[in-house]
Image (cartoon, grey):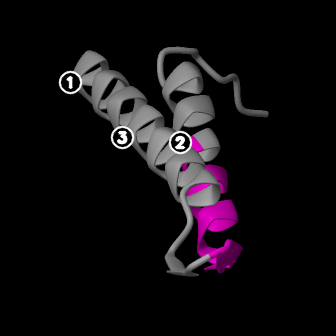
Amino acid sequence: MNKTVKITLSVTGFGLLVYGIYTLIAPEASISIGNFSLEAQDNTDAYITIAFGLVAIVLSMLAGKNIKRF
């Protein structure tokens, strides 16, 4: 069970990380009229997605470790 959780967190984390980076780079809307070009982006959700991806990757690394409690 521990290995299944670790693999699931890793795959989910990398998926969220890649999706977050893609939404950070790709423009949401663009308008082109002749020589005039306009692009608009809203990157606030991309940062949250990248953060969740990094948290999932870190949790997957910690899933296999035995943590001693006091």
Residue position marked by numbered label 2 in the rendering: 17
On screen, residue 42 above or below 64: below
Instruction: Name the foreground residue: 69 vs 8.
Output: 8
Q: Secondary structure at mark 1?
A: loop
Relative side of 3 to 31, left or right: left
Residue 40 is drawn in which quadrant? bottom right
Q: Quadrant of the C terminus?
A: top right
Instruction: Determine if the magenta segment contains residue 37.
Output: yes
On screen, residue 20 above or below 38: above
On screen, residue 32 above or below 16: below
Q: Amino acid at mark 2?
A: Leu
Residue position marked by numbered label 1 in the rendering: 1
- Can you tell which of label 1 and label 3 is closer to the viewer? 3
**Where's residue 36, x and y in %?**
68, 80
Instruction: Name the foreground residue: 66 vs 37.
Output: 37
Q: Amino acid at mark 3?
A: Thr
Between discs 1 and 3, the one toward the N terminus: 1
Q: Which numbered disc covers residue 12?
A: 3
Q: Amino acid at mark 1?
A: Met
In the image, the segment drawn in magenta is 35-53
Instruction: Name the foreground residue: 39 vs 44.
Output: 39
